[in-house]
Image (cartoon, grey):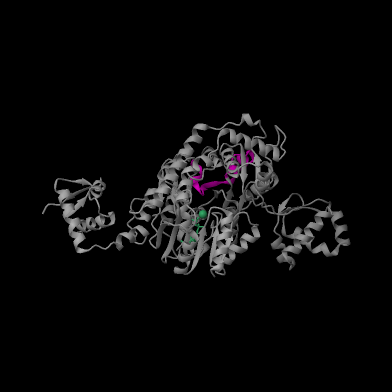
Amino acid sequence: MKDPRHILKEYWGFGSFRPLQEDIIRAVLEGKDVLALMPTGGGKSLCYQVPAIAADGLCLVISPLIALMKDQVENLRKKGITAFAIYSGMSRKEVIHTFKTAMESNCKFLYVSPERLETALFKEYLPGLGIHLVAVDEAHCISQWGYDFRPPYLRIAALRKELPGVPILALTASATPEVQEDICQKLEFNDRQIFRQSFERANLSYSCFNVDSKINKIIRILQKVPGTGIIYCKSRKRTKEISELLRLQGIPADHYHAGLAQEERNKKQEDWIRGQVRVIVCTNAFGMGIDKPDVRTVIHADVPDCLENYYQEAGRAGRDGKTSYAVLLYDDRDLKELEEMASLRFPSLDEIRQVYQSVANYLQIPSGSSEGQYYDFDLTDFLKKFRLPSHTVLYSLKALEQEDWLAFNEQVFLPPTVMFTVQKDTLYEFEKNNPALEPCIKTLLRAFEGIYDQPVSISEKMMAGLMKKEAEDVKKELTVLDHFGIIDYRPRKDNPQLCLLRGRVKAEDIRIDMQAYEKRKEQFRKRMRQMVQYVKDETNCRSRIIGAYFGDEKINDCGICDTCLQKKATVLSNEEWEIIHRRLLTLLQAGPVDSKQLLQQLTGIPKEKAWKVLTFLQAEHKLEMDKDGKVRLIPG
Ligand code: ADP
Ligand code: MG
């Protein structure tokens, strides 16, 4: 077996592993089931890629995000490592072709999206692939109690039977202790090993502000803190509004959300990464897979709906280790909305059925048919035609997805495909008569193997390189060839796709596991409550609150969040000091007192001031606080 360090150097050119990477890799190579928690950007991919290269055989990677999956495959190929991907939207032929190629080549990585796992095809080819490791990315998606449950993930458990003895490495950036436990259970870990990177971000200063004007506060922050920033908003409309207001103030800003065309999004993202635009105002669609080290501020103009998301989004600041700011802005209305959100997010069964019916009508799906077929689904157009509240529709679709009635992908990127549809002699004849199109035909035949027998994914950009033309011109030529009936050209699709997984049924036959649904709703409420608590907390270190949420109790006071700074900034006059000191001693002389009660009994004294004296006396060993929070005097 090759040495992991050598592999790291040889394929990535990195000199050393990051914290935990080496431990995780060792455990994986020992054949253990492992759960790894590392922040986004922490380097989770290497944890399965290195051991997969070190050992013989193939690593099956389960990943929910098609766009990221393709990036990974491309990056591995650039290093000369054979890798393939299978995802929703690929035709049966393409899937078979991929399986066969994977078996015949020295394939090291096969990426699959989870909904592909249970297909008969998969079961047929799985045993022949020589899988020795299964990596589950975004593993928290397997838990119903987490913030991003995806039902197809439950199918991963079935792999255990198909692949006995093959270890599983589950990876996630954030999971509460409850969800961690659930992941291990669902994946049937036997000799489990959990590796958790500290949730501490020593250079990140968290703060929360209750403000009347969010935009004024944003401008003030950006004027005070130089450097790149991200501003997260809930609605697409707001991203545009805020970025316009910032530009009026002379702050270079742009907006970004999932409703923009892919090419526009890429451009905006690139401009921001290269520093041509200082601030990006966006929805949470922004940031996935982006690794920009020098972000100085992440401002949330709205309260996110769980600490998992908040931690991840705020964590995009200060990757380079320099002091950076994560600021959350809120007003009383935001907090009220959070409290009411659960009923919006969890529509009633009647509402869910009505949405199902409307969608099936909209797509004109005949009853009893079309199982497994994908349809273009234009949500905006649908909402306009059916006049249903967008929340109800979105969350009903989600509920239907979670119960396996349908699959709805906001963004499925189907690559463009081409297949020749004429005999070779006809093609030859055509080339003779249309010499201008000959280079295009030749390039197709040379660059894409198997294109004569089946639809093959092509890349217009790559063809443009070979033909020394612009990609737009290549697209035009392909369209012409398609019109002539020479090829079947399907340009890239990036519109949302919807699929009724069990064919169309009567609305009243839609069943939902209401017990699980109610429990998910309760869990959701709990997450909201914890989010509100975080926002309102004025005494505890923010870094510690976040750590505790993820089960990391070992974090020290960060000293740089707003609550820590507040404590430090409290100045006491000698007189105040004396008064508090005396009252404390009097209260404690009768015996130990619970710290909370103690603070209450010090009526008229601000908490920070009382804490200041308490902390001082503790440091001087005049008194101590035990682990139950009881404060007592130390005699002597
Ligand atoms: P995650 O999946 O945890 O969000 P990635 O696996 O995408 O993170 O890695 C993030 C970045 O960190 C990548 O650019 C990767 O090349 C880099 N990286 C990972 N491990 C190391 C290492 N040991 N040394 C240097 N860079 C690393
Ligand atoms: Mg990752």
Residue 564 quadrant: bottom left
x and y percentages locating residue 301 in the rendered image? 49, 57
Nearer to us in this view, 458 or 352: 352
What residue is drawn where x is 86% and y is 62%?
434
Tell me which segment is drawn in magenta.
114-143
Residue 621 seen in the figure? no
* Quadrant into which the C terminus falls: bottom left
Nearer to us in this view, 200 or 356: 356
* Relative to 4, 623 lies left or right: left
Looking at the picture, does residue 45 appear above or below residue 345?
A: below
Q: Is residue 141 magenta?
A: yes
How many badges with numbers are in the image? 0
x and y percentages locating residue 377 in the rendered image? 67, 45
Nearer to us in this view, 620 or 214: 214
Residue 107 seen in the figure? yes
x and y percentages locating residue 433 in the rendered image? 89, 61
* Relative to 110, 382 lies left or right: right
Q: Is residue 201 magenta?
A: no
* Relative to 334, 362 lies left or right: right
